Image (spheres, rainbow, N blue to C red):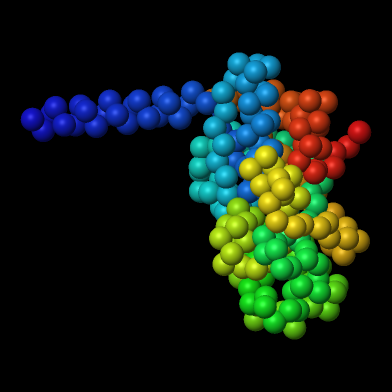
Amino acid sequence: MKFHLLFVVFILFFSCNQEDKSKLTVATAANMKFAMHELVKEFQEDTGIESEIIVGSSGKLTAQIKEGAPYDLFVSADMKFPNTLFENDLTIDKPQIYAYGSLVIWTLNTQLKADFESFLKKQVNHIALANSKTAPYGRAAIEVLKNKNLLEPLKSKFVYGESVAQTNQFIISYAAEIGFTAKSIVLSPNMKGKGNWKDVDPNLYSPIKQGVVILKNRDVHLEEAEKFQQFLFSDKGKEILNKFGYLTEK
């Protein structure tokens, strides 16, 4: 009986490992979630290669990669975290900038405009933004607030999401009346037309350079990872990124 149980456990473990290894695994910053779904779909149609998306904040994904998480590529929301991995000899090569992100103010409250004046209104008790330590879009939001001299006056209203995805949940669930998010979110098919949003003046924050890098800690899909990275920089890849509000090099 004991031998039979061990055999079943072994088979299940082996099956799980085989299944995990059968797909290209792309660790993806939360702002890229919706764009990435379309990218991997088009990539599979072009190449027949299946991909699995792991979504999280860039900082959290970096920590997981350092601990040996079995990811093939890291598609970050900045260059800082991919460069950290490169400096720790965890990548095949230096990270490359695949896109520039844009920050927006977003609200689902019909009584509010998506602007800085709304932040100061008495009816606004909570302003959502991502954690600046783990999410580059949170870092950009803090920079904007400092440049507008609003950081200290509004500090008591802030609610922090671990990533852009959690920040979005605060806004969607009305736990926060208004907040900052990535432009790619409000342009996604899932969110398009919901609430009011407005671009934040890009002069108020440092360019959000988003980087991609192939990881060393799993060489099972090295060739497929290189193909995906090439696809990201292809005309079709850029077209998808542009559709979601990202700026790309011509």
Residue drawn at 81 percent across, 58 percent down: 198
Q: Quadrant of the C terminus?
A: top right
Q: Nearer the viewer, residue 134 or 192?
A: 192
Q: Quadrant of residue 166?
A: bottom right
User: Residue 195 location in percent, x, y?
Assistant: 70, 56
Q: In this picture, is 52 found above or below 67?
A: above
Residue drawn at 32 percent across, 31 percent down: 13
User: Residue 64 location in percent, x, y?
Assistant: 53, 49
Q: Nearer the viewer, residue 228 or 119?
A: 119
Residue drawn at 67 percent across, 60 percent down: 108
Q: In this picture, is 125 found above or below 39?
A: below
User: Residue 150 location in percent, x, y?
Assistant: 79, 78
In this orientation, does residue 192 appear? yes
In this orientation, does residue 84 appear? no
Residue drawn at 65 percent across, 68 percent down: 177
Question: Along the horizontal axis of the image, is 112 left or right of 69?
Answer: right
User: Residue 99 location in percent, x, y?
Assistant: 80, 42
